[in-house]
Amino acid sequence: MGRKGGSSHRKEISSFYGWVKTFQKHQLNLNLRTKKEGTIMATKKDRKMTFTIWCLGVILIIAAWLLVPATQAGAETMNFKLVSMVEKLEMVKVSDIEGVVIGVMDRKGLSMFENGDIATTTCRGTFDTKKGFQGYSALAFEDGSTIVVAWKGPTSRVPPGGKFGGYTATFEYIKGTGRFKGIKGSGTFTGKDPRWDKDFKAKGFTYYEFVGTYTLPSQ
């Protein structure tokens, strides 16, 4: 009776361990399948994210292209030299401020370009001996093309006492016609006026060098 009961008990234990192993195997398969499904979902999610980023990049490129008002040709250099003299000058002293004079001026001269072009040049502007000067220059070429330049300065001055008075300033191309229609660009220029000749100094003769770049709309 005792042996028979012990044998039955061992069978029950063996059956229980078998059930546990089957359960563990089933659980392992379930975990592997869950992990695989999670990996597949993560891969799909990554692909979706990559595709979304790619679409946004394409949209931004197209938007940037559409926002450009006109396709521009590559920037080119336009350097020229100008010699001009004062044709008209009006100025007044500012009351109660020592040494400050304000006024308007009208200058005329010739602009000479590196490619051989020559343009008649009219410059009109205002000045304040304390704050500086600003104005416009109109350049007219032989073929009827024109350029209007706005200028402002000085950005620096030549120290007093030398043979030349001078300064540096900035300019911007703001309008053009003919072969310069749609011109855009900017640059800097220097001005030098001789101080050793009283007659030339009185007439306001000044030598300028302009250095800048510009673009034109593509045809």
Image: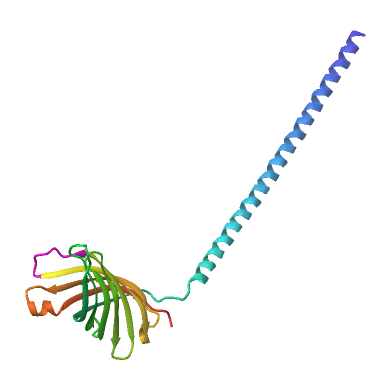
Q: Residue furthest bottom?
A: 143
Coloured how? rainbow
Q: Choose between 3 and 120: the one closer to the eye.
A: 120
Where, quadrant-wise, is the N terminus in this rendering?
top right
Q: Measuring from the top left, give residue 147's x and y in whole percent.
A: 33, 82
- Can you give x and y, in whole percent of width and height, for residue 94 in the image? 23, 67
Task: Classify residue 108 by image quadrant.
Answer: bottom left
Q: Residue furthest top?
A: 2
Q: Quadrant of residue 161?
A: bottom left
Give residue 159's quadrant in the image: bottom left
> Magenta stretch?
156-163
Residue 16 position, x and y percent, is 82, 23
Residue 130 covered by magenta stretch: no
Main SS type for the magenta part?
Answer: loop
Please determine whether, in this image, residue 15 is positioned above or below residue 145. above
* Residue 30 or residue 49, whichever sits in front: 49
- Left or right: 75, with 155 as reference point: right
Q: 26 or 157: nearer the eye?
A: 157
> Residue 116 at what x, y percent from top left?
23, 85
Identity of the residue drawn at 29% across and 75% down:
135
Q: Residue at x 60, y 58 (%)?
A: 52
Answer above or below: position of 30 versus 135: above
What's the residue at 9%, 67% (across, down)?
Answer: 162
Which residue extends farthest right?
1
Q: Nearer the viewer, residue 205 or 203?
A: 203
- How many numbered badges does the structure rendering display? 0
Screen quadrant of the C terminus: bottom left
- Check if residue 161 falls in the magenta segment: yes
